[in-house]
Image (cartoon, helix red, strand yellow):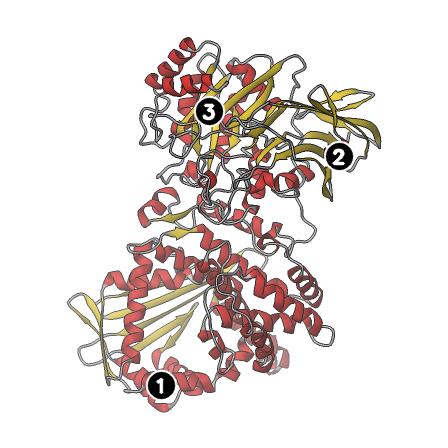
């Protein structure tokens, strides 16, 4: 072959030279194989050094003098490396050289290859200089590299900045095992750099992933936000207003451009003035104070990440947020938070989706304009772990590359993908309806299954409580002291012995041992009653479950979610004659939104059907003011009932409409002391249809679900069932409906002559709540009541369609005080074959 002819051929220059260059640059192994480990202390060290460098460059002095230790340089390497997914960075120095290296992986379809770069700066007593660089296998002398660096600096900055940069390059030296930077610089370096960057803004915009909307367009959306004080409100509120405006403007303009302007306006108004400068928006006003999930910091995480996505790279945006969380895990930080990480990722997803295509942009505008709650754009994050110190994070996760960490990150991604805004077609179906045996032969028993004693934070003994409970008509009670790990007496031999003694002394009443579970990963925020049957070894099994899975002031891998605990219960059920019962206590007491219960219960019941439902009426009814039920956070009870249960069409009904078997007719005392509580069965009571009041029968009856609950002791008896040609179906049971079924709704209520205080009783409201798959309504029934020797009866013909999911009954006795007495039944369920 004629080599001269090949060299002269155009194909060689257009194809051969790039291939030869690529061959020289690309290597099959990385120069730097692993990212340096990143910890909270490492991140803090890197941040402190970056701040010191920035302060030095920004000072009005004409000289910069900084000292970097070996630890500082390692930290800077780790932090820089962590910002880029496919690039590993390493820095180092010795008395003769400063070494800088980077390896970037490329996936060309046949496996990974690497672009390796490295440079050395030679150090001497007089000055330092760029000695050489290497690009893959291609060595490049420093005298060839420096002109390109100077050209890059010259294109953006002025000559004075260039001189300062060269002075600093020459001002590095090795001294006392440290790397020292001493150099002259411009006294107004910061202003010169800022001005140069401002002049280069148009160049930078060309390089951005997405174009920033024009300032005039952003101002249209800002003007809307300036008209209202949104302080203390959810970010959803201003978002809805802007989405409505964007949907109208998109009739004549680009929907993606309108959405981008909306994102920038939200970030400028509620995030930072820096975003206004970046978008060249003048006279912008920033007012912090909007929130997500009642947290201002989550709104900021969300907005900052949304803008980072708009101006850069999504992976880089996430890595910056992740690095911030690692930094927070160090000394003095707020701790590593997966909740914050969720906000970062959701902000990225939000901005990306709203500007990804015209169709997505228009769909998002409609969804946001008509959103009913934050769950329409933001996933649930309240159960994600947070607050990890550096040592705790290292013990539980190791580092951000561990399988444990990656699993939680994947969980966050999955939750974002389940939000309708981002994945409109995805919706989880309810779990298979559990096959629960009904109880046909039994009697009604008055019970209280949530009580505390001196073994935790109560002020009465088990015996004293049992005595009072028996006097108020309780036929079964459960002692459920807190599972906090510092309470050594709970579920101890003495605990079980006191329960056994009370059972012997009050032999007409059953005392059941249990405990109030601190549900992971909430660290004491969320509680559930856990009851085991009276079987061989059940007491020790209950104690083991508490020791392993109660989450109170402890950071461990088993506490990262509720799943390990519920999986343990599922295994235990396989060998138990009577399954354990788990009931969610005071569901909304510490929630930021009642929606959290929708997520929690659906999630828990998917994992295990030992979770049978919730406490519709929390305890602490002795508190008669705004703190009724000890609800002092964002949500309050309604006439003594949790908003999950008290609101027709609320979360309980929504879960029922989705096909979940949720039992909520439970009114317990949560007794601690007589200052804030009534004695068991004195004011609150749960009525259970059971074969007997023995422990195992009560647990089976609670699971069967033919129960009703009340406050005020104004109802003596309640019978509620649906009759068809197939027979009678009572609360807790299910009727299979293939097509429309002719049925009769049967209700029999008998009032007590007097209520708990001795006053005459009355029933002033009675509603049948009908839950369909897409509609929930209440049918008033009081006008149809027929009185028969003091018993109020209703026989209501009703055609049940296949769209009906449940019936439940509720009524009210209107009192002159703050709280009316209410009762509720568990649902009668209907399912399709």
Nearest to N terminus: mark 1 or mark 3: 1
How far apart marks 1 and 2 lie (CA) works out to: 80 Å
Marker disc for residue 169: none
10 Å crowding of disc 3: few (<14), some (14-19), many (20+):
many
Q: CA distance from mark 1 to mark 3?
A: 72 Å
Q: Quadrant of residue 36?
A: bottom left
Residue contact at pointers 1 and 3, CB within 8 angstroms: no
Q: Which residue is mark 1?
A: 191
Q: Is residue 316 visible?
A: no
In percent of the image, x 40 and y 23: which residue is there? 543
Q: Quadrant of the C terminus?
A: top right
| Between marks 1 and 3 in the image, the one whose residue lies nearer the viewer | 3
Kind of element beneath mark 2: helix
**Mark 2 → mark 3, Cα distance in angstroms:** 34 Å
Tags 2 and 3 in contact by the CB under 8 Å rule?
no
- Asked whether residue 285 appears in the rendered view, the answer is yes
Label 1 vs label 2, nearer the camera: 2
Residue where numbered disc 2 is placed:
783
Question: What residue is drawn where x is 55% and y is 18%?
Answer: 698
What x and y, as percent, mark residue 267? 51, 69
As helix, strand or loop, the secondary structure at mark 1 comes to helix
- The numbered mark at residue 680 is 3
Q: Earlier in the sequence, mark 2 or mark 3?
A: 3
């Amino acid at each position: 072959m004629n080599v001269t002819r090949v060299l002269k051929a155009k194909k060689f220059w257009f194809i051969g030279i790039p291939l030869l260059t690529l061959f020289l640059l690309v290597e099959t192994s990385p120069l730097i194989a692993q990212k340096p480990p990143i910890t909270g202390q490492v991140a803090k060290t890197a941040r402190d050094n970056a701040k010191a460098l920035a302060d030095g460059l920004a000072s009005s002095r004409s000289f910069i003098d900084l000292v970097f230790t070996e630890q500082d340089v390692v930290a800077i390497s780790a932090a820089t490396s962590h910002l880029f997914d496919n690039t590993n960075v390493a820095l180092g120095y010795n008395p003769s050289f400063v070494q800088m290296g980077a390896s970037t992986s490329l996936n060309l379809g046949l496996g990974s290859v690497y672009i390796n770069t490295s440079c050395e700066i030679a150090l001497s007593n007089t000055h330092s200089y760029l000695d050489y660089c290497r690009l893959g296998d291609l060595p490049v002398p420093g005298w060839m590299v420096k002109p390109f660096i100077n050209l890059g600096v010259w294109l953006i900055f002025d000559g004075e900045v260039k001189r300062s940069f060269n002075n600093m390059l020459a001002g590095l030296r090795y001294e006392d095992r440290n790397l020292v930077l001493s150099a002259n610089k411009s006294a107004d370096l910061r202003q010169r750099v800022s001005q140069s960057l401002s002049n280069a803004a148009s160049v930078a915009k060309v390089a951005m992933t997405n174009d920033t909307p024009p300032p005039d367009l952003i101002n249209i959306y800002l003007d809307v936000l300036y008209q209202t004080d949104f302080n203390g409100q959810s970010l959803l509120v201003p978002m809805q207003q802007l989405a409505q405006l964007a949907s109208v403007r998109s009739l004549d303009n680009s929907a993606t451009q309108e959405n981008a302007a909306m994102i920038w306006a939200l970030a400028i108004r509620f995030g930072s003035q820096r975003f206004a400068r970046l978008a060249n928006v003048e006279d912008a006003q920033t007012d912090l104070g909007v929130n997500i999930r009642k947290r201002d910091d989550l709104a900021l995480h969300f907005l900052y990440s949304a803008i980072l996505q708009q101006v850069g790279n999504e992976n880089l945006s996430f890595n910056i947020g992740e690095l911030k969380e690692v930094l927070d895990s160090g000394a003095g930080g707020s701790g590593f938070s997966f909740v914050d990480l969720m906000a970062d990722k959701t902000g990225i997803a939000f901005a990306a989706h709203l500007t990804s295509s015209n169709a997505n942009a228009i769909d998002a505008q409609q969804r946001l304009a008509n959103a009913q709650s934050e769950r329409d754009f933001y996933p649930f994050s309240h159960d994600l772990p947070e607050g990890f110190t550096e040592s705790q994070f290292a013990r539980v996760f190791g580092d951000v590359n561990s399988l444990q960490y990656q699993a939680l990150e994947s969980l966050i991604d999955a939750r974002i993908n389940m939000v309708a805004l981002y994945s409109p077609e995805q919706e989880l179906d309810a779990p298979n309806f559990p096959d629960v045996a009904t109880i046909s032969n039994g009697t009604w028993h008055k019970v209280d299954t949530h009580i505390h004693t001196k073994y935790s934070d109560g002020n009465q003994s088990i015996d004293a409580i049992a005595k009072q409970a028996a006097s108020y008509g309780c036929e079964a009670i459960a002692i459920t002291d807190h599972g906090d790990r510092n309470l050594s007496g709970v579920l101890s031999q003495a605990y079980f012995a006191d329960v056994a003694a009370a059972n012997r002394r009050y032999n007409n009443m059953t005392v059941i041992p249990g405990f109030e579970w601190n549900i992971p990963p909430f660290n004491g925020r969320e509680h559930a009653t856990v009851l085991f049957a009276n079987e061989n070894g059940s007491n020790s099994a209950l104690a083991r479950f508490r020791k392993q899975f109660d989450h109170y002031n402890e950071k461990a891998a088993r506490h990262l979610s509720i799943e390990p605990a519920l999986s343990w219960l599922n295994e235990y059920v396989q060998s138990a004659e009577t399954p354990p019962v788990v009931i969610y206590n005071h569901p909304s007491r510490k929630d930021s939104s009642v929606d959290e219960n929708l997520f929690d219960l659906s999630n828990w019941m998917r994992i295990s059907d030992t979770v049978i439902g919730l406490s519709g009426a929390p305890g602490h009814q002795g508190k008669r003011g705004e703190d009724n039920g000890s609800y002092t956070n964002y949500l309050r009870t309604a006439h003594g009932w949790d908003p999950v249960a008290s609101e027709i069409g609320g979360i309980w009904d929504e879960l029922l409409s989705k096909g979940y078997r949720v039992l909520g007719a439970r009114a317990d005392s949560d007794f601690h002391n007589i200052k804030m509580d009534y004695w068991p069965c004195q004011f609150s009571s749960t009525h259970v249809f059971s074969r007997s009041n023995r422990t195992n029968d009560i647990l089976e009856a609670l699971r069967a679900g033919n129960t009703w609950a009340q406050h005020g002791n104004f109802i003596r008896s309640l019978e509620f069932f649906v009759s068809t040609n197939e027979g009678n179906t009572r609360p807790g049971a299910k009727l299979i409906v293939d097509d429309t079924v002719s049925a009769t709704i049967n209700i029999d209520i008998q009032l007590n002559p007097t209520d708990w205080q001795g006053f005459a009783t009355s029933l002033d409201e009675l509603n049948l709540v009908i839950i369909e798959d897409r509609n929930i309504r209440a049918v008033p029934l009081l006008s149809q009541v027929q009185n028969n020797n003091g018993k109020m009866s209703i026989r209501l013909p009703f055609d049940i369609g296949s769209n009906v999911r449940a019936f439940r009954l509720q009524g009210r006795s209107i009192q002159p005080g703050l709280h009316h007495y209410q009762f509720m039944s568990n649902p009668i369920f209907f399912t399709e074959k």
